[in-house]
Amino acid sequence: MRLTDYLDKGASLGPSAPCLTTDGGSLSYGEVQQLSWRVARALARSGVRPGDKVAILSANDPVSFGCVFGISRAGAVWCPVNPRNEAAENRELLDLFDCTCLLVQESFAPLVSRIAGQLPKLATVVCLDGSFDGAIPLAEWLDGLADSPWQADPPDDTAMLVGTGGTTGRPKGVVLTGHNVETMSALTLLSYPFQPRPRYLALAPLTHAAGVLCFPVLALGGEIVVMPSPELGRFLELIERHRITHTFLPPTLIYLLLDHPGLSTTDFSSLECLWYGAAPMSAARLEEAIARIGPVLGQLFGQSEAPMMISTLAPADHFHPDGSLARERFTSAGRPTPLTQVAIMAEDGTLLPRGERGEIVVRGPLVMPGYYRNPEATADVSRHGWHHTGDIGYLDEENFLYVVDRAKDMIITGGFNVYSAEVEQALMTHPAVQDCAVVGLPHEKWGEQVTAVVQLHNGRSAAPDELRATVKDLLGSVKTPKEVLLWPDLPRSKVGKVLKTDVRAQLLAERA
């Protein structure tokens, strides 16, 4: 399936039904189709050929997301760019992707003016909601073009190029095909309850997980309610007003939501699923979320190279058959999805038995064909016939997958392997801890020492020794941090993940 097929499928169920909604009103399925046909024609008139790369730089917005389908109709490749990235990172991604056309909101004009001269292949810049020097206003770009059906045939099945995080070097471009997106959508519909015409609230950037989760909703003729900025009070209001059935939040935003004064008065009765993912979630806060929001939380485990649905812990998996909480699964990433093979591999390529820890490897139609113009990196993650996730984990006897840590985050202290995520889970059981990061720092005696940086809840207090005692009681002395530091805030990525590389770099700089 092409990306346009999800929109057209939804339109076939009712072209007048609301498709993309925001405070300014709604675009119906028919209106989004018409926009996509005009955008496709405008791209062709601008010299964009099938297979060319077209980027969108925008906050969450119905028109911007509607243009995605115009890119697909033109036979071009959509390159989502995260609006929260720094200018240098976006320049690097647009250059990496060989983008010839950029669709951008006026608020990003200063960024575009800084980087456009460094992008030799960028021929066309279109302003989606205003005008600025060097950009064609959207209305002018679309002027005189018909809104009747039209599309070009793409040269291959490439649907998207997605940038990986560039925190450890030059980012890579993940090639996602129409078949990858189709598999992800099918697995979502297989694994989760959907009623006809679901209503999905998109708070997270549509350039990230929130975006690809829109496609199965569109195929059912559902409504996407778009939030331009992550305001949690507004989020709660929209759940009630639009009777939202599905939404996605990273754990960091769920923690903030649980502390929001409006949570206790919000009617969540329409909500069928609150997906969480992108980072591990505290088992204690997960239990609190189930108690206060309802038995609707579902975890998604994936990565850019195998989007969203490597495994999933569905809402029902959080409970035993008798209705009691399955707390032992709260640190699990769920069971592998039906169309995805998951195994645990040793460094020599041997597949390990249940219960043994090794690298999580994946194969199946969910997995990308490779990185854009980077055969060396593709080969590096495709050894032994499996895609290597870079995560350490194990499968239990019931086939639940446990992600113990990123391979690069494992700490070796005194000859013992300490998984930072396990220590972080222990710290998060303390009621004063809002979030934390555990890293290894060089140590003359042990090789590395376990070091924790903790962010406390506003108005709460806890001494470092008290936090160390919490970990020691749960995990023993070897895994207990030798040092606990209290920071007011932790460095985070654009999607809310704690940046352990930045934490470690700051600690090393302070000790230099």
Image (cartoon, rainbow, N blue to C red):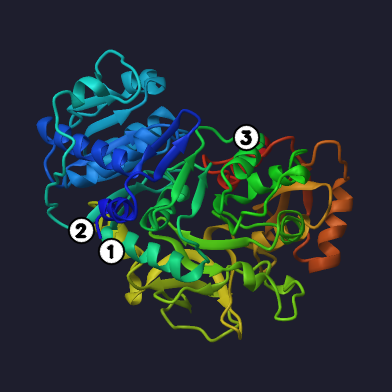
Amino acid type at image mark 1: His
Q: Residue at x 21, y 20 (%)?
A: 140
Pointer 1 with pointer 2, Cβ within 8 A = yes
Mark 2 is on which residue type? Asp
Is residue 392 visible in the rendered structure shown here?
yes
Q: CA distance from mark 1 to mark 2?
A: 7 Å
What residue does disc 3 label? 234
**Closer to viewer: mark 3 or mark 1:** 3
Could you tell me if the residues under marks 3 and 1 are in contact, i.e. CB atoms within 8 Å? no
Q: Rate crowding at label 3 as few (under 14), some (14 to 19) or many (20 or more) other CA atoms within 10 Å.
A: few
Is mark 3 in CB contact (under 8 Å) with mark 2?
Answer: no
Residue depicted at x 53% and y 68%: 312
User: Label 1's element?
Assistant: helix
**Residue corresponding to mark 2:** 157
* Residue drawn at 74 percent across, 71 percent down: 327
Query: Which residue is under mark 1?
Result: 179
Q: Earlier in the sequence, mark 3 or mark 2?
A: 2
Which residue is located at x 39 percent, y 62 percent?
185
Closer to us: 455 or 504: 455
Q: Position of residue 352 (x, y in %)?
A: 50, 83
Q: Is residue 21 above or below residue 426?
A: above
Q: Position of residue 358 (x, y in %)?
A: 53, 74
Q: Give the quadrant of residue 447.
A: bottom right
Residue 427: horizontal and vertical position, in percent?
77, 56
**Disc 2 on helix, strand or loop?**
loop
- Alpha-carbon distance for marks 3 and 1? 35 Å
Tell whether 36 sits left or right of 253: left
Which mark lies nearer to you, 3 or 2? 3
